């Protein structure tokens, strides 16, 4: 396996009292070493559910998962979906690490920073206490925390939000994982602090060549750090491609709508924003149709009735740029690129 | 830290003074003549008057109160001449009904109550926290169901029902635990008799509290298991056992310690029903008796004792909480 | 020049707070808003931006006297309302309204939408021509809600729709001034655009003056005529939107603008970013001199001792000893 991560047709369903919630419905993506792949989408589109699947954090008793999630560890690889929990645990924090959205609540309030870091090392290197403590200090220093010796003896509440996110990153890197999953790592932070953290992640990636799966709803963040992008809507991946493809020649009407609805800095502010009408659908018992059809302006360009009755596949003329839409790709390619250009001018 | 403790101690003393004034006040308002209550069947006005003088009820209220206070530190002497007798410090007064210094009565009753409370506490904390943890860990499965039934039964059955059940069935009918006729025996003297004496009262008392603690632990553990930092612990690759017994328990410890401290304090004040059923001459029974007989000195003493324990425990719990939760830890 | 609808002069709001030092309680003050001044013209949208905790919400609420100011003056239509008693404020309340950030907690979950939107009529004891019911239906239509949903409860609506309910309530009495406190921050981009457009349209039609509070710079730029950048309770820079975004003068504004990533990968690749060091200092104990001096990259000795005044630089007003 060349890639660090290969997700293939992942489906995650939660049975609830109201019916089945198809939180993730057919997601496929790969992450190679040194690469940053972003998943973007609006609230509830299934980004977090996807990322939790990668380290097997869903409760198997109340979750139905299918598809495969291959994670590479040196010469072997493991399918997180079907592997036994013991095996997955050996990968967590060592091969794949994760940082979460809310740094305020993601650290244990009662343990010292240093011991929380050391624990991450000790899980996979039992008994090596001294090495663990040394590594903890080293990592704190690496993420830019001054006086790491002293700060390691402090508790999370003595750190600011930005500092805690640095600590989370340090903790994730304790075992030099090949793959880092960052679920909205900067959403809870101020822009100036966000800039610090994104810069830090970039620097760390350069040093260690790790792959990053970055989850966010902020298109600006995606543009700044991603190499490739997957756009999610209602649990489905609607478009996938290199970052420039996505931003300058989007193929999915949803991606286009999203890009057009962001107020752009530097643009004349007298123009109205191009909002997408309507709201995202409920994920319970989604019909077999294009999930975006009720909000889409381009259904008339597709074969009559197809949008409302057939679920489009994720396909593309090139292997690197795929989308889900019934409108023929040639039509979309030119039309959407022109629209984007117009919106940017 | 010392200044903080001093400040708290200062407030504790103030509170205790207030409690004693209130108890004194309530008893003085009641339409009974305390002196009349002190004499038995063959009562004559002369004896009543004599007792009144002897016990100091002839003095104005504030002076009586003052004598009571100073007695705690200096001891107190009653009567005069050949009838003179002294209750040495700390004196909490003299009980005419029992013809004893109250401090001597306390000396007898207190060990029983303390042994009862601590034994019951050990049982309930092990059973309650253990069952709560099991229930949370196996949520929705049979251990959870069992714990739910236990909580329902434990909280809905009054102590006198469980107590009487144990007394009648376990001791009298089935004879599993022999009826203890010897009275209180210290653990060091005869462990077997000690346990025979206390085991049923312990269980009786523990059931109710264990049920509360099962419910409390289960709820707190479940809430904590949903916290983001528990997800972080799992993401590190920790096993479920470590996640539950280390990360989750650590967070649950602080609230459990707090309520346990206060519950024990409450018990020292007297487990009246349990002591009555099992005929344990502890503080609770003593207080109850004293209230029936309007034995002011005894009521006053036990009330102040109970208040002291509650206040002390509050202080200990606060200090412990500061130690357990770094966020409120004092610098 | 016409008289402003609202003038704010040296507005201060300090919240009392305390901290345990040893075992003594020490009385302190959170300097949430510390001397801000600006004018709001009729029909103008005035943006207030800054990072979390810089005092935007406090400023917005103090202007409406929902919080009593510590010092300063608030002049509404030529009348000094700073010290006005609550009783005398009531008639003015119909002319000033607020829209809240959180569409989930700002609406009473036990009241129907119709009831929520008609509340201002009840409070002010006015009956619109045609009756309350008709007026509310018209309002719902105006903000893009289906009037047939009159009897539904807030939980039956999505975040964007709830924000529309809040807007309908705010415009019910045809106010002259609306303070919109992060009205779109909790919404997704595609929904956010709908709500921004709605606010834009309503304002153009009715000529309402809006104080628009947000931390998202692109949104503020899109909607505002003028913008004030706040930091630790003070205004750092105040200018026409175009001037502020094309030629920022204050080092903080510059840093803030450079920190916001744009949805333009090619641009992002070549962008020079100013990364500020450290975190926001505490508003309880703000730095002496210029409050920004702990994170500023142009800082000099004078910045640590002397507080810069808000002075005119080019077309903007800037509080900095070394403006760009
Ligand atoms: N345990 C669960 N049981 C039932 N439904 C769930 C569960 N977890 C998530 N969902 C649902 O799955 C959908 C996707 O949720 P997810 O958290 O992945 O969204 P997201 O894209 O991360 O959104 P956000 O930007 O708000 O974080 C949501 O509709 C959510 O309500
Ligand atoms: N009632 C209060 N008592 C004490 N301090 C307060 C109170 N309200 C606000 N503060 C403090 O005043 C400062 C400014 O708060 P404010 O809510 O105005 O900031 P903000 O700019 O609106 O931030 P955000 O972007 O997070 O909404 C903060 O430090 C806050 O903690
Ligand atoms: S006054 Fe000094 S510290 Fe403040 S912004 Fe200007 S240069 Fe920076
Ligand atoms: Mg999420
Ligand atoms: Mg605010």
Image: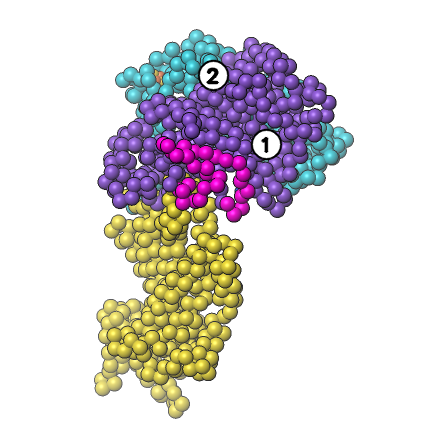
Chain colours: A purple, B yellow, C cyan
Q: Check disc 2: other Cα within 10 Å, few if <14, some if 14-19, many if 20+.
A: many
Q: Where ligand 1 lies, by image quadrant?
A: top right
Q: Which residue in the rendered view is the most extreme toward the top?
A: C314
Residue B98 spot, x, y in % from top left: 34, 82
Query: Residues in magenta?
Result: A60-89
Q: Quadrant of the C terminus of chain B?
A: top left
Q: Are marks 2 and 1 on the same chain?
A: no
Residue C239 spot, x, y in % from top left: 48, 14
Q: Tag 2's secondary structure?
A: helix
Asked if residue A230 is positioned above or below residue A77 in the image, the reply reads above
Q: Which residue in the rendered view is the most extreme toward the right?
A: C130
Q: Check disc 1: other Cα within 10 Å, few if <14, some if 14-19, many if 20+.
A: many
Residue at image point 29% right, 56% down: B9
Subunit ID for the residue under disc 2: C
Q: Does the rendering let one see residue C10?
A: no
Residue A47 spot, x, y in % from top left: 51, 32
**Closer to us: C142 or C283:** C142
Residue at image point 67% right, 29% down: A310
Q: Tag 1's secondary structure?
A: loop
Quadrant in which residue C97 is drawn:
top right
Residue at image point 53% right, 36% down: A67
Which residue is identified by label 2?
C265
Which residue is identified by label 1?
A234
């Amino acid at each position: 396996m060349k890639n660090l991560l290969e997700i293939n047709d992942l489906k995650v369903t939660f049975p609830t009292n109201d019916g089945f919630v198809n939180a993730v419905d057919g997601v496929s993506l790969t992450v190679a070493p040194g690469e940053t792949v972003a998943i973007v989408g609006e609230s509830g589109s299934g980004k977090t559910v996807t990322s939790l699947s990668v380290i097997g954090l869903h409760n198997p008793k109340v979750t139905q998962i299918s598809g495969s999630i291959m994670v590479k560890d040196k010469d072997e690889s493991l399918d997180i979906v079907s592997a036994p929990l013991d095996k997955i645990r050996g990968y967590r924090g060592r091969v794949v690490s994760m940082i979460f959205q809310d740094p305020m609540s993601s650290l244990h309030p009662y343990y010292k920073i240093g011991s929380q870091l050391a624990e991450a090392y000790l899980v996979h290197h039992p008994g090596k206490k001294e090495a663990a403590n040394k590594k903890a200090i080293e990592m704190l220093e690496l993420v830019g925390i001054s006086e790491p010796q002293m700060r390691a003896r402090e508790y999370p509440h003595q750190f600011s939000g930005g500092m805690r996110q640095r600590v989370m990153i340090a903790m994730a890197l304790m075992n030099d994982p090949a793959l880092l999953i960052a679920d909205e790592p900067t959403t809870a932070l101020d822009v100036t602090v966000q800039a610090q953290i994104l810069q830090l992640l970039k620097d760390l990636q350069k040093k260690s060549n790790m792959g990053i799966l970055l989850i966010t709803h902020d298109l600006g963040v995606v543009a700044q750090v991603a190499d490739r992008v997957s756009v999610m809507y209602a649990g489905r991946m609607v478009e996938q491609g290199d970052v420039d493809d996505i931003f300058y020649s989007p193929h999915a009407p949803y991606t286009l709508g999203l890009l057009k609805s962001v107020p752009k800095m530097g643009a004349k502010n007298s123009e109205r924003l191009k909002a997408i009408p309507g709201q995202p659908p409920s994920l319970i018992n989604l019909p077999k149709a294009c999930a975006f059809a009720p909000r889409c302006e381009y259904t008339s360009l597709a074969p009559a009735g197809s949008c409302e009755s057939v679920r489009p596949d994720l396909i593309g003329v090139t292997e690197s740029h795929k989308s889900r839409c019934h409108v023929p790709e040639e039509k979309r390619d030119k039309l959407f690129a022109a629209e984007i250009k117009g919106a940017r001018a | 830290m010392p200044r903080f403790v001093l400040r708290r101690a200062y407030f504790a003393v103030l509170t205790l003074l207030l409690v004693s004034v209130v108890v004194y006040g309530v008893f003085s308002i009641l339409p009974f003549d305390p002196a009349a209550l002190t004499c038995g069947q063959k009562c004559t006005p002369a004896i009543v008057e004599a007792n009144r003088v002897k016990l100091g009820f002839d003095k104005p209220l504030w002076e009586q109160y003052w004598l009571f206070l100073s007695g705690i530190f200096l001891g107190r002497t009653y009567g005069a001449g050949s009838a003179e007798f002294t209750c040495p410090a700390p004196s909490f007064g003299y009980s005419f009904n029992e013809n004893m210094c109250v401090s001597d009565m306390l000396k007898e009753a207190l060990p029983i109550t303390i042994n009862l409370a601590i034994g019951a506490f050990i049982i309930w904390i092990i059973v309650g926290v253990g069952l709560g943890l099991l229930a949370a860990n196996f949520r929705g499965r049979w251990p959870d169901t069992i714990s739910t039934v236990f909580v329902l039964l434990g909280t809905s059955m009054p102590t006198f029902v469980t107590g009487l059940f144990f007394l009648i069935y376990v001791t009298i009918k089935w004879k599993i635990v022999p009826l203890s006729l010897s009275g209180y025996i210290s653990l060091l003297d005869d462990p077997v008799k000690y346990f025979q004496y206390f085991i049923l009262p312990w269980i009786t008392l523990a059931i109710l509290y264990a049920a509360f603690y099962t419910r409390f632990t289960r709820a707190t553990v479940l809430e904590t298991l949903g916290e983001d930092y528990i997800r972080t612990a799992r993401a590190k690759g920790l096993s479920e056992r470590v996640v539950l017994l280390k990360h989750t328990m650590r967070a649950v410890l602080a609230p459990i310690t707090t309520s346990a401290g206060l519950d024990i304090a409450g018990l020292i004040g007297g487990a009246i029903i349990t002591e009555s059923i099992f005929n344990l001459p502890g503080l609770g029974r003593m207080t109850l008796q004293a209230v029936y007989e309007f034995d002011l000195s005894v009521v006053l003493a036990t009330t102040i004792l109970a208040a002291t324990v509650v206040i002390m425990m509050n202080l200990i719990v606060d200090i412990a909480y500061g130690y357990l939760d770094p966020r409120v830890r004092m610098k | 020049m016409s008289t402003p609808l609202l003038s704010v002069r040296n507005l201060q709001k300090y919240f009392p707070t305390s901290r345990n030092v040893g075992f003594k309680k020490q009385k302190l003050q959170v300097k949430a808003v510390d001397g801000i001044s600006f004018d709001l013209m009729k029909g103008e949208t005035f943006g207030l931006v800054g990072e979390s905790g810089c005092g935007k919400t406090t400023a917005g609420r103090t202007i409406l006297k929902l919080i009593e100011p510590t010092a300063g003056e608030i002049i509404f239509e030529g009348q000094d309302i700073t010290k006005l008693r609550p009783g005398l404020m009531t008639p003015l309340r119909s002319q000033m309204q607020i829209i809240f950030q959180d569409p989930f907690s700002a609406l009473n979950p036990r009241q129907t939408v119709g009831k929520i939107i008609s509340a201002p009529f009840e409070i002010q004891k006015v009956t619109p021509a045609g009756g309350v019911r008709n007026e509310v239906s018209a309002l719902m239509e105006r903000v893009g809600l289906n009037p047939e949903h009159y009897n539904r409860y807030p939980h039956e609506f999505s975040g964007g729709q709830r924000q529309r309910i809040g807007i309908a309530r705010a415009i019910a009495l045809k106010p002259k001034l609306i303070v919109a406190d992060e009205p779109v921050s909790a919404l997704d981009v595609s929904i956010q655009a709908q709500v921004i457009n709605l606010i834009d349209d309503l304002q153009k039609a009715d000529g309402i003056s809006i104080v628009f509070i947000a931390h998202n710079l692109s949104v503020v730029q899109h909607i505002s005529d003028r913008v004030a950048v706040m930091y630790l309770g003070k205004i750092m820079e105040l200018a026409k939107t175009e001037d502020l975004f094309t030629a920022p003068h204050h080092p903080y504004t510059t840093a803030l603008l450079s920190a916001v990533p744009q949805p333009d990968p090619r641009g992002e690749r070549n962008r020079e970013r100013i990364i500020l060091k450290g975190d926001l200092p505490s508003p309880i104990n703000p730095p002496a001199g210029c409050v920004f001096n702990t994170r500023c990259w142009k800082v000099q000795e004078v910045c640590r001792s002397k507080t810069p005044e808000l002075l005119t630089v080019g077309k903007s007003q800037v509080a900095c000893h070394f403006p760009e």
